[in-house]
Amino acid sequence: MYAPRRALLTAGALVVLVACSAGGGQPAPRAAPSPTPVAASAPAGPSLAGHTIVLDPGHNGGNAGARAQVTRPVPDGRGGTKACNSTGTSTDAGYTEHAFNWDVALRTKARLEAAGARVVLTRTSDDGVGPCVDERGKAGQAAGADLMVSLHADGSTTANSGFHVAYSAPPLNPAQAGPAVTLARDLRDAMVAGGFRVSDYVGRDGLSPRADLGGLNLATVPAALVECANMRNPKEAALVSSPDGRERYATAIATGIAHFLTG
Ligand code: ZN
């Protein structure tokens, strides 16, 4: 089960987090030391101690070389099957989605851990294969997590741009019926506050209910998928390819997660 939304409300704490992300550049200095490499950029905000968060960086660097393994059918959570995994997309210059997802996951993990959370990733490197979407979808409950967030970027036509957040719909369990939608909205709001534009080609107001994503269908904890950008759009390709851009994504995603957990 996930923690009650208002249980750990800390007055004013969210404001601090949002303020850190609003600049999109150098974060405010942090008084308390942290053992993580990103101590200087860790957001001052509500404590996430006691919370467990699963981050699911989409795809994997070895998928392209393991076609049979990656294309085998696995349960999609709605009675059908779909491919275990896929290779993901890339920018026109060849910066891969799996590398982007992995980097943003590590940056988000560091921020959440600096706030006291326990963070579990669905893969341990960016050069392995899988895991399959059904295993990813069950990773939240397997870890006893409060929530799960999958990290992706899209590969649409050049003119399209913007991010969207997907959630499982129609819902298959209580977590999907309400909390997952709230999580998606919190992530959407934090992305907008972080200066990112909502998608002009998918979903509505930055949200996209989806029935076909096994990684969301199989979750029994609140789960959402952030499609951060269209990597084929030149402006967004530049953003995802830069460390500063990826730090901005991580800041926004960590802020959205913290908002969901602490109100
Ligand atoms: Zn993807």
Image (spheres, grey):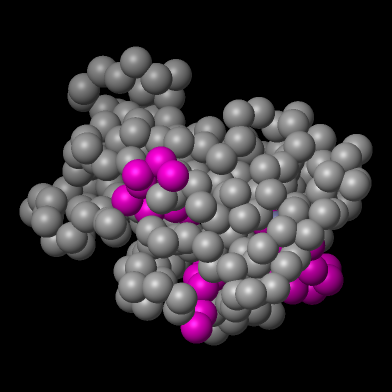
Q: Quadrant of the C terminus?
A: bottom left
Q: In this view, does 64 lie above or below 134?
A: above
Quadrant containing ligand 1 reads bottom right
**Residue 124 in magenta?**
no
Residue at position x 43%, y 24% in the image? 38
Residue at position x 79%, y 73% in the image? 159
Q: In this rendering, would 207 be left or right of 88?
A: left
Residue at position x 88%, y 40% in the image? 66
Q: Is residue 227 above or below residue 14?
A: below
Q: In this view, does 225 lie above or below 132?
A: below
Residue at position x 34%, y 15% in the image? 35
Q: Give the range drawn in magenta.
A: 142-170
Residue 204: give x, y in percent of width and height: 54, 84
Residue 211: give x, y in percent of width and height: 60, 78
Residue 257: give x, y in percent of width and height: 36, 53
> Does the image show residue 138?
yes
**Residue 148 in magenta?**
yes
Q: How many marks can you see?
A: 0
Q: In this rendering, would 176 be left or right of 207?
A: left
Q: In this rendering, would 106 be left or right of 48?
A: right
Spot the residue most to the left: 11
**Of 213 and 126, which appears nearest the observer?**
213
> Does the image show residue 27?
no
**Within the image, what quadrant is residue 41 found in?**
top left
Residue 59: give x, y in percent of width and height: 71, 47
**Within the image, what quadrant is residue 203 found in?**
bottom right
Q: In which quarter of the image is the N terminus?
A: bottom left
